[in-house]
């Protein structure tokens, strides 16, 4: 039995489809399982240890979102349940020069360490920037407003959620790839302005950019991005302003096909914009 946490997420959804298509036994876990259809689902809130035991009962492998709040308790319950393998969805940000003090990275590091220090087989998947982060621009684009960007020339390596899911599928089902660490990237280092241009081409109308200061962006996003996370994002973008990021061939290695482009992601999500 494979337990998939974060059941309402895009990666978990596609991963579930892949696993069930190959007749793997899957249990989908979410803090709100009533909204999940098609596969057995159970309540699992990674911030509530009282939900851990039932979710882990009879489970051999876990696809784990990196929530650090009660990771020690989760690991203990997983060991008690006889779990053999955990695939952690972490982030490439943990490889940054000051990851231990980076609000985005340090919680992922805590999860990686807790699982790695346990008796559980540990495989770590570290994607770079999700192409889906561009969904944050959907509202201004839909309404014809400019997209506010503090660093429009900051580079990232946008990766399609399908590629992350397919990599996770390989790690959960192919023992020869397990108990290692993998860094995933998309196929291109793109600036935010590049991504806006590609979105514009897909939806067939121009998208304006409003270059704002970091403080203006923080104020605009205050209801959606807590301050420490906003600061971490701004620091990351500032460090990659005008600087292409390193790409990997890991998607191809794990899935047998090249990583999907950002333009492909945009086409797959055109209705969102």
Image (spheres, rainbow, N blue to C red):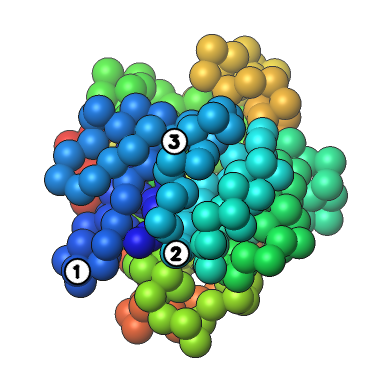
Return the x and y of residue 47 as percentages of the image width and height: 58, 30
Disc on the earlier residue, 3 or 2: 3
Out of 157 and 145, give the one closest to the viewer: 157
Residue at screen point 74% across, 47% down: 110
Out of 15 and 79, give the one closest to the viewer: 79
Q: Horizontal placement of 241 versus 42: left or right?
A: right
Name the quadrant of the N terminus: bottom left
Q: Which residue is mark 1?
A: 23
Disc on the earlier residue, 1 or 2: 1
Label drawn at residue 60: 2
Give the alpha-carbon distance from disc 1 to disc 2, as whole Å: 15 Å
Return the x and y of residue 49 as percentages of the image width and height: 58, 32
Label drawn at residue 211: none
Q: Which residue is mark 3?
A: 44
Q: Which of pointers 3 and 2 indicates the residue nearer the eye?
A: 2
Figure quadrant of residue 106: top right
Residue at screen point 41% across, 81% down: 174
| Mark 2 crowd level (few <14, some 14–19, many ≥20, 10 Å Cα) | some
Q: Residue furthest bottom?
A: 176
| Mark 3 crowd level (few <14, some 14–19, many ≥20, 10 Å Cα) | many
Q: In the figure, 20 relative to 249: above or below?
A: above
Disc on the earlier residue, 1 or 3: 1
Verify CB contact (< 8 Å) between mark 3 and mark 2. Answer: no
Give the alpha-carbon distance from disc 3 to disc 2, as whole Å: 16 Å
What secondary structure is found at the residue carrying circle 3? loop
Residue at screen point 54% across, 77% down: 178
Name the quadrant of the C terminus: top left
Give the alpha-carbon distance from disc 1 to disc 3, as whole Å: 23 Å
What secondary structure is found at the residue carrying circle 1? loop
Return the x and y of residue 121 as percentages of the image width and height: 60, 70
């Amino acid at each position: 039995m494979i337990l998939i946490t974060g059941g309402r997420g895009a990666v978990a959804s596609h991963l579930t489809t892949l696993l069930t298509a190959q007749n793997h036994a899957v249990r989908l876990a979410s803090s709100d399982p009533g909204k999940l259809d098609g596969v057995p689902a159970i309540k699992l809130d990674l911030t509530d240890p009282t939900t851990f035991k039932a979710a882990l009962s009879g489970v051999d492998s876990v696809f784990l979102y990196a929530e650090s709040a009660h990771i020690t308790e989760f690991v203990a319950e997983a060991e008690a349940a006889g779990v053999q393998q955990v695939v952690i969805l972490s982030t490439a940000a943990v490889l940054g020069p000051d990851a231990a003090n980076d609000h985005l990275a340090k919680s992922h590091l805590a999860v990686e360490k807790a699982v790695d220090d346990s008796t559980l087989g540990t495989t770590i998947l570290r994607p770079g920037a999700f192409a889906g982060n561009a969904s944050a621009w959907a509202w201004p684009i839909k309404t014809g407003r400019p997209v506010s960007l503090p660093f429009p020339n900051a580079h990232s390596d946008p990766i399609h959620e399908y590629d992350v899911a397919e990599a996770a599928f390989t790690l959960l089902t192919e023992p020869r790839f397990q108990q290692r660490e993998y860094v995933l990237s998309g196929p291109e280092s793109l600036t935010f302005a590049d991504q806006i241009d590609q979105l514009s081409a897909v939806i067939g109308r121009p998208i304006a950019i409003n270059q704002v200061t970091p403080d203006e962006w923080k104020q605009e996003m205050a209801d959606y991005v807590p301050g420490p996370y906003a600061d971490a994002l701004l620091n990351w973008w500032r460090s990659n302003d005008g600087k292409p990021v390193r790409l990997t061939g890991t998607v191809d290695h794990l899935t047998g096909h090249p990583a999907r482009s950002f333009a492909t992601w945009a086409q797959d999500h055109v209705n969102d914009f």
